């Protein structure tokens, strides 16, 4: 078997890890060696007795900027030039992270994730170390740690052997260009609401058709741009 998915996270707050990744599906997979997580303190590469990692922005303005030399040293210590793993910088300016990105990452050797803090990182280290800026959504977090956990959670559940049934990941929202159909479970009636009759019919072809119709309807109502992108009709 080839080496398991290897994630390395660079952060000023290593205590925030494994965080949610230590529980449930991802946590069990981590304990079982289905993936590997290394957390590295950026401050270990800070300069001087005080291990300084940031400085004031050139040109003035509020906040502090993570220094290029410090971030580069932290990266170089864990990821050699020929490291095949992509290097991501968590950033609200980045490319929006999507299910297809999770799938591509999960199929590869792993990932190196740099968590920003303060106003962000010196622009020069982004190009200098080939960092891909990735965003988890159009809002601003106070640091990249939660974003890194979001991305790793999305990847880890796709690693073979992590989820129970191999098929279950493929039916989900965003996997086939649609949002998922509604779910129901017992009791058959709850607060006067019934489970749709078709789901109790035992007719698998009819159920599959109903689910597909529902998925298209819900996607059309909530995210019409997804339907357009996949050229599906509501
Ligand atoms: N001044 C920056 C925001 C800095 S927020 C700007 O306006 O673009 C501090 C750090 O939080 C960032 O460096 C980044 O690592 C992380 N972060 C904030 N929002 C994020 C998002 N939507 N996705 C991923 N990372 C984010």
Image: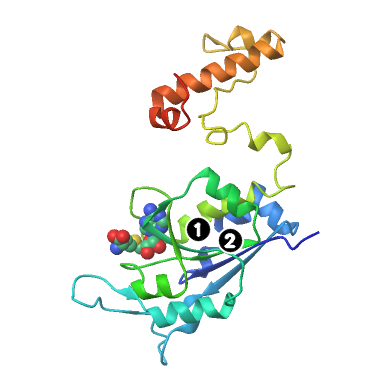
Mark 1 falls on what kind of element? helix
Quarter of the rendering containing residue 194: top right
Task: Please provide percent x and percent y for residue 176.
Answer: 56, 32
Mark 2 falls on what kind of element? loop
Q: Nearer the viewer, residue 216 or 197?
A: 216
Report the quarter where the N terminus lies.
Answer: bottom right
Q: Nearer the viewer, residue 105 or 228?
A: 228
Task: Please provide percent x and percent y for residue 197.
Answer: 61, 7
Residue indicated by mark 2? 18
Task: Please provide percent x and percent y for residue 162.
Answer: 71, 47
N-term mark: 1 or 2: 2
Rendered residue at 59%/65% (across/down)? 85
Seen from this angle, which residue lies furthest right?
1
Residue indicated by mark 1? 148
Q: Is residue 143 among the parts visible in the rendering?
A: no
Report the quarter where the C terminus lies.
Answer: top left
Rendered residue at 18%/75% (across/down)? 60
């Amino acid at each position: 078997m080839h080496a398991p998915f290897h994630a390395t996270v660079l952060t000023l707050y290593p205590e925030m890890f494994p965080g949610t990744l230590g529980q449930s599906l991802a946590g069990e997979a981590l304990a079982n060696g289905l993936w590997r997580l290394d957390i590295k303190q950026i401050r270990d590469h800070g300069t001087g007795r005080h291990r300084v990692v940031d400085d004031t922005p050139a040109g003035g303005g509020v906040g502090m900027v993570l220094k290029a030399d410090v971030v580069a040293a932290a990266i170089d210590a864990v990821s050699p030039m020929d490291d095949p793993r992509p290097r991501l910088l968590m950033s609200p300016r980045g490319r929006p992270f999507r299910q297809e990105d999770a799938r591509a990452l999960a199929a590869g050797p792993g990932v190196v994730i740099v968590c920003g803090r303060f106003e962000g990182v010196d622009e020069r280290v982004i190009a200098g170390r080939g960092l891909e800026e990735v965003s988890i959504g159009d809002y601003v977090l106070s640091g990249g740690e939660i974003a890194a956990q979001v991305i790793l959670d999305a990847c880890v559940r796709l690693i073979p052997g992590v989820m129970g049934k191999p098929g279950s990941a493929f039916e989900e929202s965003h996997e086939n260009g649609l949002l998922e159909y509604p779910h129901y479970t017992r009791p058959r009636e709850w607060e006067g609401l019934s489970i749709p009759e078709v789901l109790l019919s035992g007719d698998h072809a009819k159920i599959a058709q109903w689910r597909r119709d529902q998925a298209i309807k819900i996607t059309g109502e909530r995210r019409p741009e997804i339907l357009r992108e996949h050229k599906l009709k509501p």
